[in-house]
Amino acid sequence: MIYHKNFQLLILLLVVGAMLISCSKPPADQDRIVVATSILPLMDFARQVGGDRVDAFAIVPPGVNPHIFELTPEILIKTSRAKLLILNGIGLEFWADDLISNLQQSDIVVIETSKGVEVLEADDHTGGNPHIWLDPVIAMHQVRQICAGLCRVDSIHADYYRTREARYIADLQKLDEEIRMEIAGWRSRAFICFHPSWRYFAESYGLVQAAVIEKHPGFEPNPKDVAEIIRVAQEIKARAIFAEKQFPVKISQAIAAECNIHVIRLDPLGSDAEQFNYIQLLKENVRQMALALK
């Protein structure tokens, strides 16, 4: 679906060529473990656990919608250096099989961090909802999976990774407590969102996702759906619609105008790879939610 077959040989040649070039001179950090992650939150988890032992990067660039993301030869070249590939799972990385099958190295370790998570059904009923990282409690599970992966590819430094894992889990537990205390004081519990990213978050913190504008990426609601969303917004006395930075905002604005309410843009993925911090991302999203629910 992502690659035309006549491109596959070219892609493989690009990967091999890049590997040969990289082998001609030693890397700056020979001892660091290169870790490829699908999205920025998983990249931050890997960096938090791996510390100065890892060089982690995200395959999906900041600001890009992961549901329609396409692989490129450049990504294959970059990922070909990785010893560990960290995925979210639950269909988020629909391109993962193509990526793995086109990588030169056969010994790359693949970790799917959703393994063992109770998956919620997607709003379009076509599969599971993949947005598990937005629940800090589930994020702790993902961090543990990542630590296990790092210990597997770099067992000599396992104690280092486990120490950092425990420290970061404690930080996530504190985040969870702070969010619960904040939400306990909110007057409203129900919200309308553009995309069902916040379903796990809502389930964990006693909120209600009352309506979703775009249940399936790329498919706008029909007039009947829009009328129902407006009805729900009026019923729950919604003060805002939660849109997202990775999706177009036009239809959210149109529905909000009909309801005489605001659009608040949340960010489930982050927009800056270098400065990304999962804990700060969640805190900022909660601050934005409070504008409509507190």
Image (cartoon, rainbow, N blue to C red):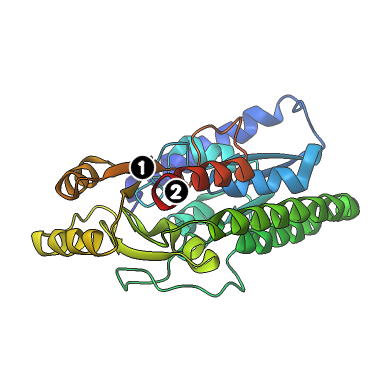
Across and down, in percent, residue 260 comes to 20, 45
Mark earlier in primary sequence (1, 2) = 1
| Identity of the residue drawn at 73% across and 24% down | 25
Q: Tell me the residue at 80%/37% (across/down).
A: 52
- Could you say which is closer to the camera, residue 204 or residue 261? 261
Decide if residue 219 is on the left or right side of residue 278: left
Q: Which residue is mark 1?
A: 264
- Image-quadrant location for residue 111: bottom right
Contact between marks 1 and 2 (CB within 8 A): the answer is yes
Residue type at numbered disc 1:
Ile
Report whether 121 appears left or right of 237: right
203 left or right, relative to 220: right
Decide if residue 112 is in sight here.
no
Q: Is residue 152 visible?
A: yes
Q: Position of residue 229 (x, y in %)?
A: 21, 61
Q: Position of residue 29 (x, y in %)?
A: 78, 30
Q: Is residue 11 or residue 74 the one in the foreground?
A: 74
Residue ID at (54%, 64%): 205
Q: Disc 1 and disc 2: Cα gap in Å?
A: 8 Å
Image position, residue 60 (x, y; %): 48, 42
Type of amino acid under label 2:
Met
Q: How many marks?
A: 2
Left or right relative to 76: residue 194 = left
User: In this figure, which residue is indicated by the disc labeled 2?
Assistant: 289
- Secondary-structure class at tag 1: strand
